[in-house]
Amino acid sequence: MTDEIREMCKPLRLAYVAEVYDQIPFESPEQYLKELFEEEVRLREEAKAERLIKKARFLSSKNIEDFHWDPSILLPDHLTHEDLASLNFIRNIENVVLSGSPGTGKTHLATALGRLACQSGFEVRFFRVSELVEGLEKAWREDKLQSFRNRFAKVDLIILDEMGYIPFSKEGAELLFQCVTDWYEQKSLIITSNLEFSQWNRIFSDPRLTAALVDRIIHHAHLISFTGQSYRVTHALSTKKT
């Protein structure tokens, strides 16, 4: 019977009904069909979220529920933890910039928000900035730059992790600037950096390009400062004491 139901479900594009129809309690025809279709929708959404998470290429499985909002994390007055987790910044095509010392939780929060966005149906891409620039330079050398940039056409949120750890070549900085210009007011960005904006000249050699890049990023941005000590260092010191 299950095989027959599975075959009938194929033209209807019901991917899960054949697997769960015998697990739904029957109280009335209306109740049974309602709960059956609710389960079909729930499983579809779960599968979609998993596909989006895989495509995003996160480097860890950090979730928002695991994130500790330390008092040293300073949010702007207009923004709350709940506002951030609502993902309205994506719907409003706004950016989030997380700045502070290494090890303070910036990448954890960026990843957690990105995974939450995938679970909400948004298309996300996660990059270490140095790896993105390497990809852009490679595409430029191979005359495939436009094809590379086209990959972002349907993306809603782009996470650029570790801005400032490695300086760029002149070509790399210009290519990254072109991408940010493409995304300006079209997509949301989350950027993590160990540098304040005034120090970005260290990684972008051209002051005018740096100013133009920062201007585009902060125009519609929520700036969050991580002012605490490194969790990794704190944990290592506490372990040493015990």
Image: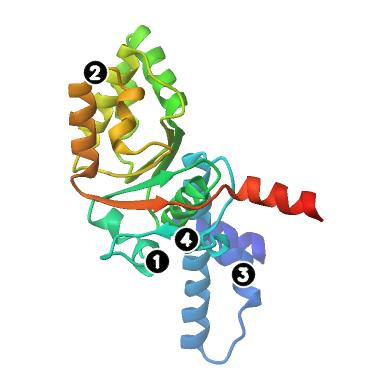
> Residue at the location (35% across, 23% down)?
202
* Mark 1: secondary structure: helix
Q: Is residue 217 left or right of residue 2?
A: left
Examine the rendering and report whether any part of residue 144 can be seen. no
**Where residue 133 is drawn, which disc sits there?**
none
| Type of the residue with mark 3 | Val
Q: Tell me the residue at 62%/69% (across/down).
A: 20
Separation of residues labelled 2 and 4 (CA atoms): 45 Å
Task: Give neighbour class at mark 1: few <14, some 14-19, many 20+ (Cα, 10 Å).
Answer: few
Mark 1 or mark 3, which is nearer the start of the sequence? 3
Closer to viewer: mark 3 or mark 2: 2
Select label 2 or label 4 by which is in front: 2
Which of the two discs, 4 and 1, labels the residue nearer the N terminus?
Answer: 4
The first of marks 3 and 2 along the sequence is: 3
| Residue occupying the far right of the picture | 242
Q: Residues within 10 Å of mark 4 (few under 14, many from 20)?
A: some
Q: Which residue is mark 3?
A: 20
User: What's the mark number on residue 45?
Assistant: 4
| Type of amino acid at the residue the image marks with label 4 | Glu
Q: Residues within 10 Å of mark 2 (few under 14, many from 20)?
A: few
Give the residue at mark 2: 206
The image shows residue 102, relative to residue 20, as above or below, that is above
Q: Nearer the viewer, mark 2 or mark 1?
A: 2
Count the marks.
4
Residue toward you, 25 or 181: 181
Q: Position of residue 145 (x, y in %)?
A: 31, 17
Instruction: Check whether the beta carbons of the residues at disc 2 and disc 4 lie within 8 A of each other.
Output: no
For the residues carrying marks 3 and 1, which lies nearer the camera in this image? 1
Q: Position of residue 108 (x, y in %)?
A: 52, 50
Sequence order check, earlier mark of 4 and 3: 3
Which residue position holds label 1? 81
Where is residue 83, by image quadrant?
A: bottom left
